[in-house]
Image: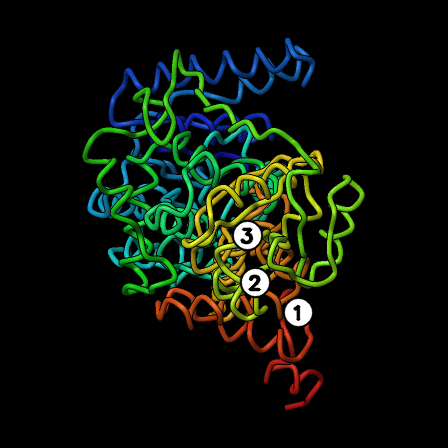
Amino acid sequence: MTIRRMRVIGAGAMGRGIAQVAVTAGIEVELTDGVESAVDAGLEFVTAMIRRSAEKGQRTDAEAEAAIARLRAGAAPTAPGPDVDLVIEAVVERLDVKQAIFAELETATPNAVLASNTSSLSITAIAAVLDRPERLVGLHFFNPVPLMRLVEIVPGLRTGAEAVAVARRVVRLFGYTGVLAKDTPGFLVNHLGRGLPTEALQVLSETVAEPVDIDRIARDTVGLKMGPFELMDLTGLDVSHPVLETVFAGFYGDPRLRPSTVTATRLSGNLLGRKTGAGFYRYDGGIQQVPDEPSIDADPAAVVVYVNEDTALAELLRASGVRVLTEPTEHAVSIVSPVGTPTYRAALAAGVNPAHTIGVDPLSVAGERLTVVVPAMLDAAIGAAAARALAATGRRVTITADGPAPVAQRLIASIVNVGSAIAETGLADPADIDLGARLGLGYPRGPLELGDAHGPRLVVRILDGLLEYTGDPRYRASAWLRTRAELGMSLRDRGTRPVDLHVGREG
């Protein structure tokens, strides 16, 4: 089936964006909306954006005008259209509204594949009102559509192969990347995106670290482009918190996806983020106001240290002029490297005094920021001296309270575990999981790639330690993750499945 003419229903931000990329891909588009003025505004907006792209040299003036000529106002959202090949609906997220539209479209556009841009509603449920539900497929674009070049292709339980094939074809025609996702709450990307904020909020609720410190650790140790709190401020809690609740409820309270009272309370107080001038950060004229990092005077002679089982950190300190002992003494500050455990427990396990011990997250040692963990009974003067010695390395230093495990370890383990659980339940293929995270969430590495980079065994060790210490089932390792850790397999390896034994079998 060739897509020549397309109807877009809904002239808001998503509908306009879809119309824009469609006409620039060579498809004739009729833009419709229940409000006539919205269509006029949409046409004007798309025309302006296409001409602006020509001014920027992204296409020639002739190409821009040809694309604009392919765009027109449609008569009505459900007007007869026997020549329409594809309809993409992008209206309000209400099941009854979408069902009513598609029930009329089934007759009005008898030759079209029907697609919904829903981000939260079940494709199966939307199609339930159709006589031929096999015609309906989910095509979930991301905002802003012209910049976010990822589309989730979501078949409902009764979606036909032809509708999926057309969806794949049109995504490729747009020059976008499609990932196949099952019809489950949050589909793929919104589900994947729960791993980071849920654990960051849990860390915050334990008063282990402030939002700005968690964001700094997320960027400099985890390797993310944006920290979880600046990302929630950018999106707005009026958008992000309902998604947290929807996905959690949709999976019947899976503890891995549990939301936080932190965002619920802030939402009720209209502390939504950038759009309201205040969220986890304050905004002045739309500009994020980031607190200065605490000043630590570097002093390699501030204290003598003993480093327990972290050769890289010991060498870094020695190279910075800090005196490092090979055995603990009464007068030296001990430095332990907690993995999946509180610093005080790591101190006790190493046989050193927790009052004279700090933790340094071993995952931070190779980066630009050292994360220092302060156990509850640490002598404050000794801890301050140790911080000055660590600052002598030239690294930025972030100091957090002691918790069930260092912050970066918790964020990484949660991201990897949620991605692994999605692979385990077959909601998406491993390659699409990582691709969806990179293109839809802006992660430099997908969750399975991230897990492989640190090693599945390390991630399981962190999760098992968190589960043992807290008793919270949010930290149970998925079977996908644990199996591959124990077998030494990559998290991106699908593994042998029963169907693989039948390849080439006759009959």
428 or 263: nearer the viewer: 263
Foreground mark, 3 or 2, reads: 3
Tell whether 263 sits left or right of 324. left
Chain-order first, disc 3 or disc 2: 2
Q: Position of residue 449 (x, y in %)?
A: 65, 57
Name the residue beneath numbered marker 2: 339
Tell whether 163 sits left or right of 61. left
Disc 1 versus disc 3: distance between alpha carbons? 38 Å
Residue at the image position 25 percent from the left and 22 percent from the top: 35
Query: How busy is the neighbourhood of tag 3: few (under 14 within 10 Å), some, or many (20 plus)?
Result: many
Q: Position of residue 150 (x, y in %)?
A: 55, 41
280 or 186: nearer the viewer: 280
Q: Is residue 59 above or below residue 294?
A: above
Name the residue beneath numbered marker 3: 358
Q: Amino acid at mark 3?
A: Ile
402 or 267: nearer the viewer: 402
**SS at badge 2:** loop
Q: Is residue 111 visible?
A: no
